[in-house]
Image (cartoon, rainbow, N blue to C red):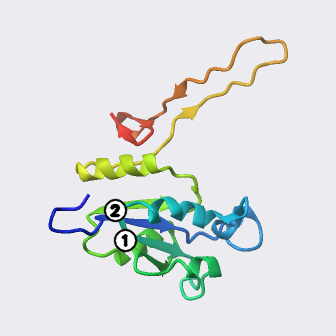
Amino acid sequence: MTSPGDSRPDAGVVVVAAGAGARAGPGEPKQFRPILGVPMLLRALRPFTSHPDVGQVIVVVPAGFEARPPEWLGKLVGDRLALVAGGATRAQSVRAGLGALPPHATVVLVHDAARPFVTRETIDGVIAKARLGVGAVAAIPVYRFPIPSKTSSKSVSRKPYHETVSGGRRLRRGSLER
């Protein structure tokens, strides 16, 4: 949301894509690999670059890729999207991304590029919480699916499973709530 005298979107997004993706095996970094023909990172970026409240997206990439990104990523660089080199740790990479955001970004979202299916609804919910001065962590319901035995006729429960985390908060979609 912007103030009446300012037409710039107020949200800035740091998309952390600086990991080596070593568990994905040899080859290019995991975040550059395609999912059904579309690079994972591009899938992660689209909901943010198309969001009307997002004015700037900073993509934190492995060192060296900020100067020579894959062609599909280089084409996206412009007024609303910039690339910065990541650090040796995730915390250093996030710090680098935060440092590249413009001062008018009063709402900041940090997103992991290895989570390519974030929805507009989730982004809207996190931005709304942040505008209220509440820190928010997006999460989706976790479901437990017991594996029935071959002799059991019990049905599988599809009730959301809420796990308590530190401070007595429960994991829920959109934020951590007490």
> Percent from the top left, x then y, of residue 24?
73, 62
Q: Cα distance, mark 1 to mark 2?
A: 8 Å
The amino acid marked with disc number 2 is Val
- Element type where label 2 sits in the image: strand
Question: Going 62% across and 29% down the picture, which residue do you hit?
Answer: 144
Q: Nearer the viewer, mark 1 or mark 2?
A: 2
Q: Quadrant of the N terminus?
A: bottom left
The amino acid marked with disc number 1 is Leu
> Percent from the top left, x then y, of residue 106?
26, 64
Asked whether the viewer can see residue 11, the reply is yes
Identify the residue under disc 1. 98
Q: Is residue 26 left or right of residue 63?
A: right
Question: Going 53% across and 28% down the picture, which residue do you hit?
Answer: 161
Relative to 110, residue 152 above or below: above
Q: Are marks 1 and 2 in contact (CB under 8 Å)?
A: yes
**Residue found at the far right of this picture:** 150
Question: Going 73% across and 58% down the picture, which residue do you hit?
Answer: 36
- Looking at marks 1 and 2 on the same chain, the residue that comes earlier in the sequence is marked by 1
Q: Quadrant of the C terminus?
A: top left
> Percent from the top left, x then y, of residue 108?
34, 62
Identify the residue under disc 2. 108
**Residue found at the far left of this picture:** 5
